């Protein structure tokens, strides 16, 4: 489905970095979901660059809900949300339009679209499109919250510095969701930001690992083949620009473990609920949620736009060249990416839950 | 789409471990693809347990092509391939049918299917279903080979032992595809097997990491949102029972790297082709193939069935219990899983290529 | 999705007229639906040729449920049902394999599949494949019956003879579902059969119009764009070989009517239920069911296989030729087609209902 | 997929009659399709009410291409086109918001959306949304024209008056595409319009039958099960508000015919091309195009909004009421609907062709 995703709830994204607007249509939403404009704004705020190291492109992110909302509630028909672009500076790109910025999609887009792609600012490949994803995701995140399903992501590792892991999920998630630079250990956060600033000063960039947890999910969601909860979330998360890997539970970290270590023993807890003692499987068995926190990590590669000189090619003239990317770019996007991960995670879960429980599941 | 996957070519899998048969339907295949029965057999052979440590359940895997092939070639209409089950011993499961084997889908299936699931041998969640995937995949792997697109997977790490990485892709892939226990370094393979045997003797199991490479892919395949090449492959691969993580290129291994290190500089090679000097991005930029080898790693968790006593619950009576899984099980499935990964990778690529180049792309 | 159909419940059909078997996979069925083998048999019986005028190919239609049923109930995983072919006589087709039987898919299949299609007996285009659709549909028809949703189809018109229209829907539907040659007016049925026999004696064939009614459907099912109840049903019904038109309610018959005549006025009935006084819209307003009987008619073209000499071409040698189709063929299939229409109608409704009310909707 | 449609090219529509805008996203378009703004305008002009009998709501239909077009050509990424609403008068609807206008979706929408639907002017069910479909369709119609595939629709029957049938397809199609009120026989057109005016004077409305022809289509497009060319077109066309029936070729009109009459004999024409002598099957055999003109008719019901008093209910209070629909409404929409039918037909064919020939098929 290319630029659309989902089965029972479908999101379609559109827009280019330097076009009129970016936007998204969500179809299949239950009617009667309250749409909280200030929450959408605050989510967009978490995605927006800020602080000492952020890109100098500062969009206001004034969004417009074009359709699908009436009297403050979803109608059940397609919700279109748009965010006009106001701060695009296309002239930055004219001079480098035939150069393949290393790590970017310039070359591959040219192969795919035969030169017709909008090259300005990465066009449809730009991180700018994630603003639309975040705005759409905000509607879903708040709907899930009404159902007591909560999602939080922290910067598990950045620029070589590690954060502490999740402790008590509920309070940790609440805390993260109010933070600009989401870490569980404030000391680690300070160190990360210092390191980012130092790397920026070298004309370089950095990435890291995000860790996401979801609590409140019922057991029994997902499919054996092929729409496992893990598959659906991976599909969405790995389409976020810059994300190159995902693991559920402890996966790669326990690649050397034995079955007796990796298996999560079941037990009946004091409330009579069936739980697992450990959670190495990240809340999913056989592709289906088991009611434990759903936990996954995703790897965000270092921002490919760097001012340091790099070797590259002019893909039109097929000649070797050098490039220094001088636009307005972030030395790290991991702290901004986490709200995109939250948004798409919310989307995937809302989709799976709606498919399972029916169209009205998210209806207040 | 639940138990179906794909856009232009769609695979649907069916069957239970102890039912009459497992099978798959592939729809959307080009007409005129030669179907090589002996290659299907040899691929099934690579998946089949064998040797000292394999499960004692030894299916012959006699497959039947029910439809879609005429005079040795695909017709273009749905190809159904079935593999009857002949060696199922259901009595092994009767006594433990209400117990949640740790790491397995017994509990989650019961939550999802309300007790109607076929519990015998894991039912539809059984690794047995992968035989159908491998048989169907063999048709596609050989079609891709005609197009000079080749896929190979080795056991990158198992039971704490590492293999060497890919060197010269072509010869390495050829070599792997003829091996029962696919490693690039024979010494590493011997050590892995010894270690597996030792772990089996403890009543335990192990897993590891697979590394897959695809060569011969054209640049320009995949979508920006949401059907990136990485997303589509992740979706398929993470639905394989036991696989819990995936990364493209060096992802998690270079989580601390800088942009100047992770970016792969472009250059024009001696043949005038645009290539990258390094391949940390695993052959994909912006979700689209760049013509370099597509490389990813997937984490296979240790086989959950172990004979060591584990804590668990009776999920019907909601009581704590102990379990020792006494059926016929492998202490490691990673060497068998790799052909499943190859099969689904082939499937994803054939699908993306067919969508891009049209229905007749794979037609000889 | 080519040979698959559905959103929440997906049916995939496979098989060729003279291959090993025809079959279908249904995915997304609720767990816990009772599977009544004798009802499947009786539905297959209604599709099977019989009587004076039927084709001489008489398949026993012994079906096998390969997967997805355990202890007589659906498991919730893919249900595969297969019907082996036992009575195929391929030699009938060898001599005419390059001739385009008029009204058949021989020429178009050759254009599409470049000569690789299985030409024997129409291959995948054969009416034989509908046996699989009927077997799969029987599972769904009986599940809907438990929900008090009932479907019936009569031969509204055949060979120039008209049947009476539906009167009291419930009893009429019950009556039709037990009849081999489904008409509401027995006299009309006798005349139709006489006429069919006379036409057969001329080496010719006939078709007609089926009328289908569904009662017990809740209001509120279907989508505004594009998955209206009418769209979804049309999609399925118009893929049945030989069906060339569909109308909901009185459509073409009231093409000259005024709004004041075609609009169905609403009223509150004695039970306080909102109903319409007339039903010219066939139970659907704005693409969504309104709780009235859903009524549509579909046109079945005359069987294209006739023994009378026809002009045609040899499409391989591109030469004009004559043909007389001498295989075993029905002079009318309309009475057999109706159970195929019922099956796919049931399928469409089950799909829309499951999407609306969730996966467990059909669970007993 | 609800408000989305298509496999290889996907259209999603959004917007409400009295919301900010209506719009559509088309995804999967080839890159490099020239986008002709003046053609979009002229197509919107054909849909816009006009003349003596049209609704008094006169929108300017200023469209905005939000994304997917760069330097006048499609980029290959999602094309979003929006048409702001400027002339909505919501006060007309406040007083009747709980009344079910007969023949409209008010009651069914309320059942489906539980009262959260935007009731103003029919909300998402309004014919207003078709403006977005027409704007999006214009891009595709002109792309098909470059491929020599041309589509034309005439008013085959309206208010009891019949038009002549297609004669020489090419010139007839060209002629229709420049007409506001598309008939092949100008006399018939004058009579139809007179009759519409007379019916309007009675406070009533009328409908009729459209006939659509497509020439230049290659043979071999469509699928046996379930995505036949007929199925795909029916799905789209029957989702247009007010369309209640469709037939391919002569279907219902030849319900009493014999096989020897309905079958279209094949012959080799003077250019060596295989054609059929007659075209009762409407250019489709076995669901697949045969290279003859694709011809179908669709029934447009009389506009449900009429000023004559009708019986209805207040669906909130479940009471009988009377209604006279006083908004600005057309006594006939058939002449405006035809460009919607053309648009969706173009869309379906572009989708099937792109799936068959690949993503770049429509690329100039």
Image: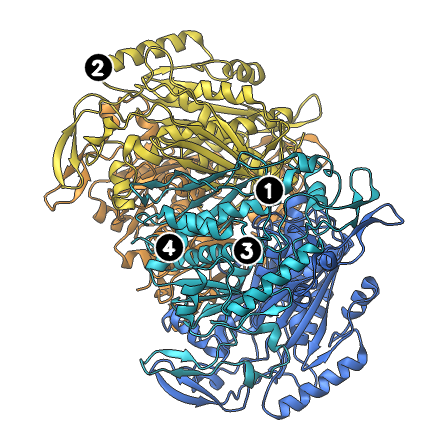
Chain colours: A cyan, B blue, C orange, D yellow
- Could you tell me which secondary element the residue under label 3 belongs to? helix
The residue positioned 28% from the left and 43% from the top of the image is D116
Where's residue D144, x and y in %? Answer: 60, 27
- The numbered mark at residue A319 is none
Decide: is C257 above or below C226. above
> Which residue is denoted by mark 1 in the rendering?
A124
Q: Secondary structure at mark 1?
A: helix
Q: Residue furthest left?
A: C270
Q: Residue A337: which numbered mark, if any?
A: 3
Q: Which residue is mark 4?
A: A142
Looking at the picture, tell me which residue is in the foreground, C261 or D82. Answer: D82
Asked if residue D224 is positioned above or below residue B204 in the image, the reply reads above
Q: Nearer the viewer, mark 2 or mark 1?
A: 1
Disc 4 sits on a residue from what chain? A
Within-10-Å neighbours for mark 4: few <14, some 14–19, many 20+: many
Task: Return the x and y of residue A264 as percentages of the image width and height.
Answer: 49, 80
C-alpha gap between disc 4 and disc 3: 19 Å
Q: In the figure, is residue C258 to the left or right of A128?
A: left
Which quarter of the picture shows residue B97?
A: bottom left
- Report the residue marked by disc 2: D202
Q: Position of residue B274 (x, y in %)?
A: 81, 47
Residue plotted at (41% across, 48% down)? A40
Instruction: Say few, some or many: other residues with alpha carbon within 10 Å of mark 2 (under 14 / 14 to 19 / 20 or more).
Output: few
Q: Nearer the viewer, mark 4 or mark 3?
A: 3
Q: Is residue C84 visible?
A: no
């Amino acid at each position: 489905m290319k630029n659309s995703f989902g089965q029972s709830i479908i999101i379609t994204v559109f827009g280019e970095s330097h076009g009129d607007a970016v936007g998204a249509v969500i179809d299949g939403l239950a009617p009667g979901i309250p749409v909280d404009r200030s929450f959408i704004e605050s989510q967009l705020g978490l995605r927006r660059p800020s602080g000492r190291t952020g890109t100098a492109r500062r969009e206001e992110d004034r969004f417009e809900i074009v359709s699908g909302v009436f009297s403050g509630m979803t109608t059940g028909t397609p919700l279109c949300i748009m965010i006009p672009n106001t701060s695009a500076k296309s002239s930055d790109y004219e001079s480098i339009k035939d150069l393949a910025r290393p790590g970017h999609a310039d070359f591959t887009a040219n192969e795919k679209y035969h030169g017709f792609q909008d090259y300005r600012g990465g066009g449809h490949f730009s991180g700018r499109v994630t603003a639309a994803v975040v705005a759409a995701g905000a509607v879903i995140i708040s709907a899930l919250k009404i159902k007591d399903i909560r999602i939080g992501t922290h910067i598990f590792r950045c620029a070589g510095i590690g954060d502490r892991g999740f402790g008590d999920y509920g309070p940790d998630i609440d805390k993260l969701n109010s933070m600009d630079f989401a870490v569980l250990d404030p000391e680690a956060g300070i160190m990360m930001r210092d390191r980012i600033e130092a790397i920026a000063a070298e004309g370089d960039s950095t990435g890291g690992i995000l860790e996401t947890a979801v609590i409140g999910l019922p057991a029994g969601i997902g499919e054996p083949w092929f729409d496992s909860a893990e598959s659906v979330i991976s599909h969405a998360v790995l389409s976020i620009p810059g994300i190159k890997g995902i693991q559920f539970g402890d996966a790669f970290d326990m690649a050397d473990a034995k079955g007796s270590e990796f298996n999560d023993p079941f037990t009946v807890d004091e409330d009579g609920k069936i739980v697992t003692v450990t959670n190495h499987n990240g809340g999913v068995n056989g592709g289906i949620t088991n009611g434990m926190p759903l936990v996954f990590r995703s790897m965000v590669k270092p921002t490919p736009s760097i001012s340091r000189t790099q070797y590259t090619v002019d893909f039109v003239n097929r000649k070797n060249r050098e490039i220094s990317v001088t636009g307005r770019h972030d030395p790290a996007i991991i702290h901004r990416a986490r709200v995109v991960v939250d948004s798409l995670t919310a989307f995937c879960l809302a989709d799976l839950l709606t498919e399972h429980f029916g169209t009205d599941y998210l209806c207040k």
